Amino acid sequence: MKHTIKILALVLVLALTMCALASCAPSSDPDKALAALKDNGYVAGDSDALATVLNGLLVVARVDAKADTIVSGSKIDENDAVQTVTIVYFKDSESAKNAWETVKEYAEENKKDDEDSSWTIKQSGAMIYWGTADGIAAAR
């Protein structure tokens, strides 16, 4: 009986850990991320202009990847701080991995100097996203 309880406890801990890790990134569906941002009071949309710029950078850098969709949103919170997120969706995770360095450099160059310390950039599956912690959380 003790052995079974230990195994069940371990399975439960692993399941909860996977849920916690999976919930750190924005939605992997661009439509759901856009809807979540709007539901959370963000001014949000998909950006053809940003996709054009980013895809141009990828071509110049000779990176074998092309951004399929880009969703971004921002809002001013109750403390007058700007919360923002940008999510770049690729056709597959390999394309996102290929584009990582170029997109990271682009995101770092476009980071506002007054952004808070929660600003981050990460790759998760077929997407690369950056912004403030609140912005990223709003896109889940």
Image (cartoon, rainbow, N blue to C red):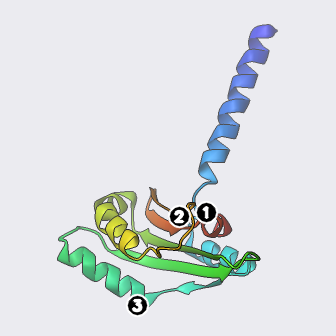
Q: Could you classify mark 1 by the number of other residues whose Cα lies within 10 Å: few (under 14), some (14-19), or many (20 or more)?
A: some
| 62 versus 1 height, above or below | below
Tell me which amino acid carries mark 2. Answer: Trp
Q: Position of residue 139 (x, y in %)?
A: 63, 69
Give the mark nearest the N terminus, 2 or 1.
Answer: 2
Lower sequence index among marks 3 and 1: 3
Residue type at tag 1 = Ala
Q: Earlier in the sequence, mark 3 or mark 2?
A: 3
Along the viewing direction, whichever of 136 and 23 lies nearer the viewer: 136
On-image quarter of the N terminus: top right
Q: Quadrant of residue 42?
A: bottom right
Per the image, the residue denoted by label 2 is 119
Q: Residue furthest right?
A: 1
Residue at the image point whose x is 39% and y is 58% from the top: 93
Helix, strand or loop status at disc 2:
loop
Q: Nearer the viewer, residue 106 or 79?
A: 79
Q: Say what amino acid the circle numbered 3 marks.
A: Ala
Q: Which residue is mark 3?
A: 49
Image coordinates for residue 76, horizontal then vertical, percent: 68, 81
Disc 3 vs disc 1: which is toward the camera?
1
Label 3–label 2 contact, CB within 8 A = no
Mark 1 = which residue? 133
Residue found farthest to the bottom: 49
Real-space Cα separation, disc 2 to disc 1, in angstroms = 6 Å
Q: CA distance from mark 3 to mark 2?
A: 23 Å
Residue at 26% in and 74% down: 58
Assess whether mark 1 and mark 2 are in contact (beta carbons under 8 angstroms): yes
